[in-house]
Image: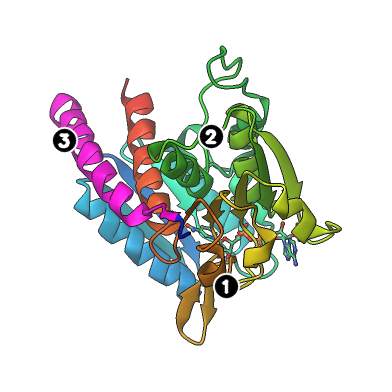
């Protein structure tokens, strides 16, 4: 049996129309154009590509992305000074700091300089901490407003739109980075899933994956998760982006997995397009919060 495809491209398109209406309404009501500043030091090719993609995406949605690029030789103080200046600029509602930063720069220190209210990428410790402390959905959150990193937020929204049930399910997240694995685990836990987080030191990884009703892969290793690691009927969300001879493949061996899973994200066209749209939504939310 072949799985239902969690079509991120199609869902993102539907969400674009919803977002466009919300942005138009916001701009008409306030006269403010939601604006993100993308900060980078150096010319890492993937960062250059992503910054340009963000600029195009934002422009298509009626929003603005400004690029602020320092040379590879930029110091930590210069990066922090730029972020501090952008924090104070009322016409900038969101700030994204691109990684990798040049050698010798303490990435955590630069991220800590962000204003949490402009941290639309959800990398500041206040936003990460509030996500960690927030109550399960449906109960009073108990913390202030926060931003969730766009990639895991997109994975959750994609599953929601296909009616995936989280309550009481066993979710296994492979990967524990601050930007994908860890927030994904927290989001699933907030939705009342029972969550297991795996990483490079996990013993018996295939056995644990086989117990998953919802299996999320955020590893960065091409096709590491095989079809026989998947429980028949499971929901499989693949965040992996790996270049294999010029072809983009996920962390899940898709051709095998699609025969076993109940639902699965393709790569490309699954979680990727959802990331872009969630970043746009975070930016609009930031602009709303700052504009009142
Ligand atoms: P990181 O490299 O920061 O984290 C990878 C995680 O995988 C770590 O927790 C690591 O464990 C774990 N890991 C590595 N090897 C193994 C292994 N053999 N078995 C089990 N776990 C392992 O990556 P990111 O979280 O930033 O990204 C993960 C993937 O998602 C990448 O392919 C990236 O390109 C992609 N990505 C996709 C996005 C999208 O929009 N779809 C956006 C962002 C990222 P440990 O902690 O022990 O080192």
Quickly name the residue at label 1: 73
Q: Position of residue 275 (x, y in %)?
A: 43, 51
Tell me the SS state at disc 3: helix
**Depth order, front residue of 255/219:** 255
Instruction: Judge whether residue 12 is colored magenta.
Output: yes
Query: What residue lies at 25% left-to-right and 44% top-to-bottom?
Result: 14
Query: What residue lies at 46% left-to-right and 84% top-to-bottom?
Result: 246
Spatial CA distance of label 2 from label 1 is: 27 Å
Q: Where is residue 6 in the image (x, y as percent from the top left)?
A: 41, 52
Decide: is 164 above or below 38.
above
Q: Which stretch is magenta?
A: 4-30
How crowded pointer 1 is (Cα within 10 Å; few <14, some 14-19, many 20+) is rated as few
> Which dot, 2 or 3, sits closer to the camera?
3
Q: Which quarter of the image is occupied by the C terminus? A: top left
Quickly name the residue at label 3: 24
> Which dot, 3 or 1, sits closer to the camera?
3
Decide: is 230 above or below 133.
below
> Which dot, 2 or 1, sits closer to the camera?
2
């Amino acid at each position: 049996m072949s799985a239902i495809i969690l079509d991120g491209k199609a869902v993102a398109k539907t969400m674009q129309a919803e977002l466009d209406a919300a942005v138009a309404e916001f701009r008409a009501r306030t006269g403010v154009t939601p604006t993100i500043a993308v900060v980078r030091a150096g010319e890492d090719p993937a960062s250059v590509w992503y910054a340009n993609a963000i600029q195009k995406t934002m422009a298509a949605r009626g929003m603005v992305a400004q690029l602020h690029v320092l040379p590879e030789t930029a110091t930590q103080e210069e990066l922090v000074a730029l972020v501090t200046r952008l924090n104070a600029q009322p016409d900038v509602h969101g700030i994204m700091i691109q990684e990798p930063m040049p050698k010798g720069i303490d990435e955590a220190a630069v991220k800590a300089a962000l204003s949490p209210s402009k941290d639309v990428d959800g990398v500041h410790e206040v936003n990460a901490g509030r996500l960690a402390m927030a109550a399960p959905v449906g109960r009073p959150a108990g913390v202030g407003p926060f931003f969730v990193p766009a990639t895991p937020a997109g994975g959750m929204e994609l599953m929601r739109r296909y009616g995936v049930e989280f309550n009481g399910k066993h979710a296994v997240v492979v990967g524990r980075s601050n930007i994908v694995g860890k927030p994904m685990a927290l989001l699933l836990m907030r939705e009342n899933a029972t969550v297991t987080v795996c990483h490079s030191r996990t013993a018996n990884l295939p056995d644990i994956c086989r117990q998953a009703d919802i299996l999320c892969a955020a590893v960065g290793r091409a096709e590491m998760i095989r079809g026989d690691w998947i429980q028949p009927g499971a929901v499989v969300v693949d965040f992996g982006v790996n270049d294999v001879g010029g072809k983009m493949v996920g962390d899940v061996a898709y051709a095998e997995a699609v025969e076993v899973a109940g639902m699965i994200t393709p790569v490309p066209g699954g979680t990727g397009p959802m990331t872009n749209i969630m970043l746009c939504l975070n930016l609009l939310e930031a602009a709303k919060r700052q504009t009142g």
